[in-house]
Image (spheres, rainbow, N blue to C red):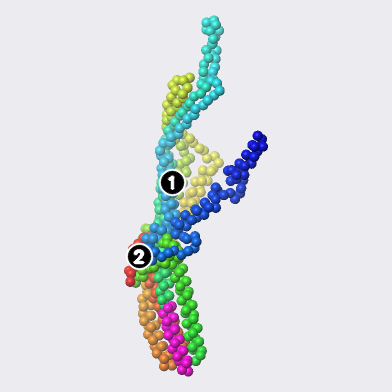
Amino acid sequence: MRAELVLAVVLALGCGPMRILTRPEGDGGWSADRRATELSTRADAARVDLAGASPEPTDDLTKPLDVEDVVRLATLESRRVVEADRDVDIARERVIETRGRYFPTFTGQGRYTWYTDPQVTQVSLAPGLLPAGTVPPVVVVREKQFGTANGTASVPIDLFGEITKNLTAAQAGYRAEEARRWSTVLGEQVAAVRGYFAVLEAESLRVVTEQRVAAQRQQLANAQSKFDAGRLTKNELLVVQVALRNTEQELRQRDLEIARARWALNQVVGRPVDAPTRLVDVSAPPTVPAPADALRDAYAHNPVLQALVEEQQRLEDTVSAIVRTRFPSVQAGGAIDYTSQDVLQPQRVESGFVGLSWTFDTGGRKTAEIEQVRLAAEQNRTRVERSLRDIEASVRTAQLAATERLAALSTAETAVRQAEENLQIRNQQFDVGRATSEDVLDAQALLALQRAALATALYEAHTRRAELQELMGLPLDGTPASPR
């Protein structure tokens, strides 16, 4: 028996729950298959193929998206927004938990007990009080088996307002969490808009590079023809060949930029990262508000600033609630006690009570706690002041950047026409021998530069406008854009 007992103990220590206590790495009760299944489930929800395969094109993936579609998908599919939603839910439950302190607390207990013998006592009487031969009575003070039950209802009396201040602090925390969620939504929307225009910009720059490749190939053909006719030096021909190879390499870089921009966009909008997302181009420039209007909206709606203001109330109400814990805590309620023993009567007893508890801060812990929260409130006031200055600087910068991009768009439109005319003149001069290959390549580079400025200015203006709208705390659903 002893050997079997020792063996059972050893097996329990080696294979049972004791392994969790004795093995430092543990396993949490999950096997390798269980962990793989959990990761696979999460990968399916995240639209990630663990095998690394590219997604099969479908109508949903190949349908072109416009700005409104991208903003909507970023709001619905972003994992950061889902995390922010959970934070709001946690804050809501915290409010419900605090509010529940107003309501009665019910506790109940029950027990059925068996004893080996009843508990009795003999009554001692004065001699001669009982007739001769009479056995003194025996009194049962506890039966051999019996059951007891009792229930208590206790209602807190918020005499000094501690519960109220805790509740208002929790509600302020909930409002702050809602503001942070809106900040997250706007951040994801702006990230989606930034990715949207980054893809369009990369595609436009690729078109510009393709135009340069076509022009340089034509220039190479002309230079080769002149070289064969002895009208061009070998050096001028080599210059054109090197320039063409460099531009063809730049075309590969443009492909990489398009892929990166599309991957970033797909990640924000919740599509498979390698999905062949197509986008609707835009042609209309955005409308940029005046600095004063943008600042007024930012001060009124910026979610970061709103969250700090709500956090200020939460901290101040928390200080007030902790201070009120210095006063007595008052409670009232009632209780019912029942026993199945019939030794004493009545078997059921009802009662009511009013009481208080008073904790004295002899060690200074309460004072230190109050001071910590008070200092946090002071620190938050400084954050509000810093945020106001940061918002003003950021709004002015974004507004001016959007205005500058619109001006650059207008300038580039004129510059492209002038660069095209300059290239045409250089080509004519090259045909008659009055310009070199380098002159033509310089004219082509100038035209490509102006075309790139024209291609990027519009998209960057929309991006700056979205960033300004984020600072203003306004939704991006109405971002101005019209399809071509």
Residue under the image location 41 percent in, 64 percent down: 192
Label placed on residue 316: none
Tag count:
2
Residue 132 visible in rendering? yes
Horizontal placement of 36 versus 61: left or right? right
Identity of the amino acid at label 1?
Arg
In the image, is residue 267 above or below residue 222?
A: above
Task: Work out which residue is located at the far top of the displayed protein and give it.
Answer: 132
Residue 440, quarter of picture: bottom left
Q: Amino acid at mark 2?
A: Thr
- Indicate the quadrant where residue 216 lies: bottom left
Q: Give the magenta range.
A: 209-230
Q: Which class describes the residues within 10 Å of circle 1: few (<14), some (14-19), or many (20+)? A: some
Along the viewing direction, whichever of 15 and 209 lies nearer the viewer:
15
- Mark 2: secondary structure: loop
Q: Position of residue 6 (x, y in %)?
A: 65, 38
Given residues 336 and 380, the one toward you in this image is: 336
Measured from the top left, where is residue 347 in percent x and y?
Answer: 44, 23
Which residue is labeled 1 in the image?
A: 94
Cα separation, mark 1 vs mark 2, equals 36 Å
Q: Is residue 302 visible?
A: no
Q: Is residue 480 above or below residue 222?
A: above
Of the pair 340 and 331, the residue shown nearer to us? 340
Which tag, 1 or 2, sits closer to the chain's start?
Answer: 1
Q: Which residue is mark 2?
A: 479
- Quadrant that contains the N terminus: top right
Query: On the rendered image, what quadrant is the C terminus found in?
Result: bottom left
